[in-house]
C-alpha cells in the first residue's frame, strides 16, 4: 500500500545523544516535511524539502538536521543542541507543485529524552 | 494576533448531534483550507480540502469557508463515537508544493458520547 512510513514509533534516548528518525514514502511525492507536535502548541514546521538534495529550514530548525539524498527518504536527526527534544514528530509529503495542495502525514514517532 | 485561532475544547456531544468546529484567521492571503482528523497517538489524516470560498460536502462532513469574515467551519452530521478525535484546521496562501508551509490551528478535541 502507498503511504508514509516513520520509524521507530517510540524512541527513548539519553540527554546529549543524537538520534535519527526515519521517514520513507512510496507516494512518488516530490515534497517532504518534518513537523513537531507538542501538547497545546499545534504543529510546527522543522524542515521541508521540495526536491532531492535540497531542503529549507522551517520555523523551528535549530537543533535539527536533515538530508534528502533520495526522493523517497527524508531522515531527521535530533541533535544534542536541541534543548527540549521530547515531542511527537510527524513526517509528511505532498503532491507536486501545480497539482493541488494536499499534504499527507505518517503515523509519527514519539521521542522521549531522559 | 495569532495567524490561526482554534478553540481547543474539549467539546463533548451526544451521539447523533451535529458538531460545528471553527477556525478564524488573520491573513487575508490564505486561499487553501484543510481539515485534518487526528486520533490519539496517530498522525493527522486529511478530511476535507477547499480552495477559496464556498462549501464542500463529503458524506457526513461539510466544510465552509467565509473569506470575508476570515472564518472556516467543519460540520459533522449524525456524529458517531468513532468521530472522537482532535480536529485540526490548516491553511496556506500558496500551493504547499511551492513553498511548503501550512499554518495549523492548535486543534479542537471532540468527544462523542454513545
Image: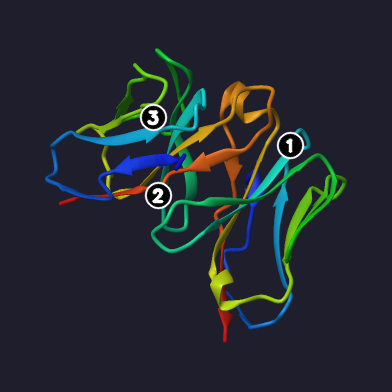
**Who's the residue at 57% across and 38% down the image?**
A103
Residue that extends furthest to the top in the rendered view of this protein: A53
State the SS at label 2.
loop
CA gap between label 2 and label 3 equals 21 Å
Question: Relative to the observer, which residue lies in front, A23 or B11?
Answer: A23
Q: Residue under circle 3?
A: A61
| Badge 1 and badge 2 both on one subunit | no
- In x, y percent, where is residue A16? 13, 37
Q: Position of residue B48 (x, y in %)?
A: 68, 51
Identity of the residue furthest to the front in this view: A1
Query: What label does residue A107 carry, if any?
Result: 2
Per the rendering, the mark at residue B30 is 1
Vertical arrangement, residue B76 with respect to residue A2, above or below = below
Left or right relative to A28: residue B75: right
Q: In front: A77, or B69?
A: A77
Q: Chain of mark 3?
A: A
Separation of residues labelled 1 and 3 (CA atoms) = 24 Å
Q: Residue at x 37, y 41 (%)?
A: A5
Amino acid at each position: 500500500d502507498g503511504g508514509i512510513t516513520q520509524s521507530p514509533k517510540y524512541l527513548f534516548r539519553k540527554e546529549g545523544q543524537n538520534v535519527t528518525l526515519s521517514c520513507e514514502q512510496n507516494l512518488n511525492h516530490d515534497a517532504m516535511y518534518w513537523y513537531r507536535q507538542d501538547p497545546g502548541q499545534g504543529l510546527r514546521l522543522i524542515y521541508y524539502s521540495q526536491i532531492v538534495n535540497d531542503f529549507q529550514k522551517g520555523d523551528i530548525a535549530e537543533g535539527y538536521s536533515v538530508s534528502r539524498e533520495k526522493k523517497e527518504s527524508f531522515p531527521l536527526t535530533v541533535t544534542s543542541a536541541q534543548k527540549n527534544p521530547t515531542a511527537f514528530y510527524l513526517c509528511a509529503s505532498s503532491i507536486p507543485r501545480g497539482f493541488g495542495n494536499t499534504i499527507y502525514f505518517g503515523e509519527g514517532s514519539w521521542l522521549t529524552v531522559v | 494576533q495569532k495567524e490561526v485561532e482554534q478553540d481547543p475544547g474539549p467539546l463533548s456531544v451526544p451521539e447523533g448531534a451535529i458538531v460545528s468546529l471553527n477556525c478564524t484567521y488573520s491573513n487575508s492571503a490564505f486561499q487553501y483550507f484543510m481539515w485534518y482528523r487526528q486520533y490519539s497517538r496517530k498522525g493527522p489524516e486529511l478530511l476535507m480540502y477547499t480552495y477559496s470560498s464556498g462549501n464542500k460536502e463529503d458524506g457526513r462532513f461539510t466544510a465552509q469557508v467565509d473569506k470575508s469574515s476570515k472564518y472556516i467551519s467543519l460540520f459533522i452530521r449524525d456524529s458517531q463515537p468513532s468521530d472522537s478525535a482532535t480536529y485540526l484546521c490548516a491553511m496556506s496562501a500558496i500551493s504547499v508544493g511551492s513553498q511548503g508551509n501550512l499554518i495549523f490551528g492548535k486543534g479542537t478535541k471532540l468527544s462523542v458520547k454513545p
